[in-house]
Image (cartoon, grey):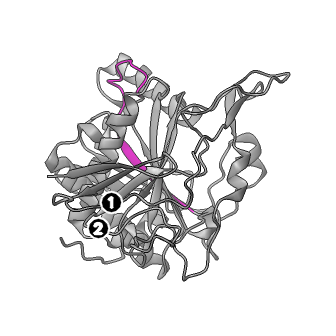
Amino acid sequence: MMHKRALVKPDGRALMLYARAPIDGIISAPSPSSTPHAPNPHLRWHPLRAEWVAYAGHRQHRTFLPPAEYNPLAPTTDPAQPTEVPAGPWDVAVFDNLFPTLAHTAHEPPELSIPTAPALGACEVVVFTQDSTATLGRLPLWHLELLLEVWADRYRELGQRDDVAYVFPFENRGVEVGVTLHHPHGQIYAYPFVPPIPARALEQQRLYFEEHGEGLLEAFIENEVSDGTRLIYNGPLATGFTPICARYAYEVWVAPHRGVPSLADLTAEERTDFARALKTILLKLDGLWQRPMPYILAFQQAPTDGQPHPEAHVHAQIFPALRMPDRLKYLAGSEIGAGVFTADTMPESTVAQLQAISVVVDA
């Protein structure tokens, strides 16, 4: 059972604490500042790409790789310490980002020669654990299950807002992908529109569902499980694999077998197997590199735009950092400029390396 406690920071930002046990006692929500928080990011329309670009100049002032003795994501009871989370009996913490790309306070965008709009929505920081030395893959299995419940709770709560059409949990890991703090954490962006990449994928899933009466990803997973070549984990209710069409070396997807639209729709049993699949994959990636592998972990799920999405199938995608020594290529002109990826490695070759890594996934 998940327990939740909602608090408000001195600057008005929300803080949610989650745990397996009740969160009792007097807990104050700390903040680096008591000044009322009212960021004002905005969107500009890209006429050639037909998509919105977000502008948030205040993010230039965010904390970047602070000294080891200062960790703004570490709990403390010292009122003089400018931290974001309190000491107390919690396992996962979520709070409004101090430097958001999207905000419910966004208003009055600049008038330009192209369309603009307030960058409405939300940006939350998810602190995975109080242990600053931990990693997502090395958390106990129960902790990963709890984290999946937290992501599901945020999907439900943020998805009810009128200014949110898509809830996107993700983790950037490593300075190679721009991480500004080493404490294990991720983020949630709640967009006022469905972003281009999931929108394109959802459209293909919708067309397939209308033609075949079943989900595209569900059929894709059935084929991968039947073939078996690229499987890394295959449990009773979830699987982890390198897709046959992987654009990145060591790209891995994790998904439930059943075509459920969001993390909030997973059963307890599916959540357990999903957590085991994710933990297995992350441990193997670290084992392959013999170091914490820099990656992007992104969850794709159904929009919260008020429309039914029977075509959607929640899944996690793990992409490596743009460059790892001797193994990966830089994204260059074709990839960045044209969106056409050239793979220097075969999925069947890279997955064989991951399959060979032995890991122990216990509770």
Nearer the observer, 20 or 335: 20
* Residue 147 visible in the current orientation: yes
The region drawn magenta spans 304-320
Q: Position of residue 345 (x, y in %)?
A: 57, 62
Nearer the observer, 344 or 54: 54
* Residue 355 visible in the current orientation: no
Dividing the image into 4 quarters, which one contains the C terminus?
bottom left
Rendered residue at 37%/32% (across/down): 216
For the residues bearing labels 1 and 2, Cβ distance under 8 angstroms? no
Left or right side of 332 for 356: left
Amino acid type, callout 2? Gly
Q: Position of residue 155 (x, y in %)?
A: 36, 38
Does the magenta portion include 330? no
Left or right side of 209 for 339: right
Left or right side of 329 for 311: left
Q: Which residue is mark 2?
A: 88
Above or below 346: residue 264: above
Q: Position of residue 224 (x, y in %)?
A: 33, 48
Q: Secondary structure at mark 2?
A: loop
Label 2 crowd (10 A; few <14 / some 14-19 / many >=20): some
Does the magenta portion include 307? yes
Rendered residue at 25%/50% (across/down): 4
Rendered residue at 47%/27% (across/down): 165
Above or below 161: residue 344: below
Q: Secondary structure at mark 1?
A: strand
Tag nearer the camera, 1 or 2: 2
Circle number at residue 60 = none
Alpha carbons under labels 1 and 2: distance apart? 11 Å
Q: Which residue is mark 1?
A: 92
Q: Position of residue 121 (x, y in %)?
A: 53, 34
**Image-quadrant location for residue 285:** bottom left
